[in-house]
Image (spheres, rainbow, N blue to C red):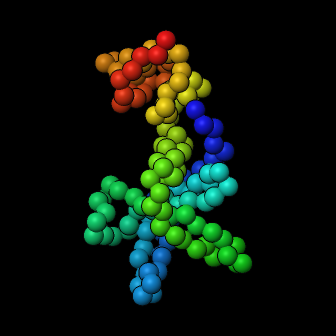
Amino acid sequence: MEENNANVEIFDEDSIIELFDENEKGVKFLEIASIELDGKFYELLQPAEPMEGIGEDEAVIFEYTVGDDPDERNFTPLFDEEILEKVFNEYLKAVSDCDCDCGCCDDDCDCDHEHNHEHNGCECGCGHDHGHEHKKK
């Protein structure tokens, strides 16, 4: 399993950011989380108002850089599926209430615990339904 140095900041429900498109039209987003991963910065955003192509329970991920002014951030939409998955998994880890150290809450489970999905959790004690069926011994 690849180890990542991730730092995740979760925002409260009132944190709103306005981004501007190429036509200088402003679009407001709720800031869900800011994630530093492998030396880059990402922002998980959810539209503050209904937006075509994005469901109510969906979010978008942008990579951002900081300009000369520390309050100035430049956002670029993220399209790389592998990076999107890594960033979102770091967010899920941050909001998870799992406190086990076996790593079984990752998609690439490599622990020696037998996962028992019929009982809504694995035998490592984390209590999560991992959503995949396998047993590792």
Q: Residue at x 36, y 30 (%)?
A: 131
Q: Residue at x 35, y 23 (%)?
A: 133
Q: Position of residue 90 (x, y in %)?
A: 54, 45
Q: Position of residue 59 (x, y in %)?
A: 40, 58
Q: Is residue 42 left or right of residue 122?
A: right
> Quarter-wise, where is residue 52 in the image?
bottom left
* Residue lying at the far bottom of the rendered structure: 23
Q: Position of residue 42 (x, y in %)?
A: 56, 59
Callout count: 0
* Residue lying at the far top of the rendered structure: 137
- Inspect this view and state whether residue 91 appears: no
- Inspect this view and state whether residue 106 appears: yes
Name the foreground residue: 128 vs 136. Answer: 136
Vertical position of residue 53 compared to residue 86: above or below = below
Q: Residue at x 48, y 62 (%)?
A: 78
> Quarter-wise, where is residue 128 in the image?
top left
Vertical position of residue 71 compared to residue 134: above or below = below
Vertical position of residue 37 compared to residue 92: above or below = below
Q: Residue at x 58, y 32 (%)?
A: 1
Q: Position of residue 79 (x, y in %)?
A: 45, 61
Name the foreground residue: 30 vs 41. Answer: 41
Q: Is residue 39 left or right of residue 125?
A: right
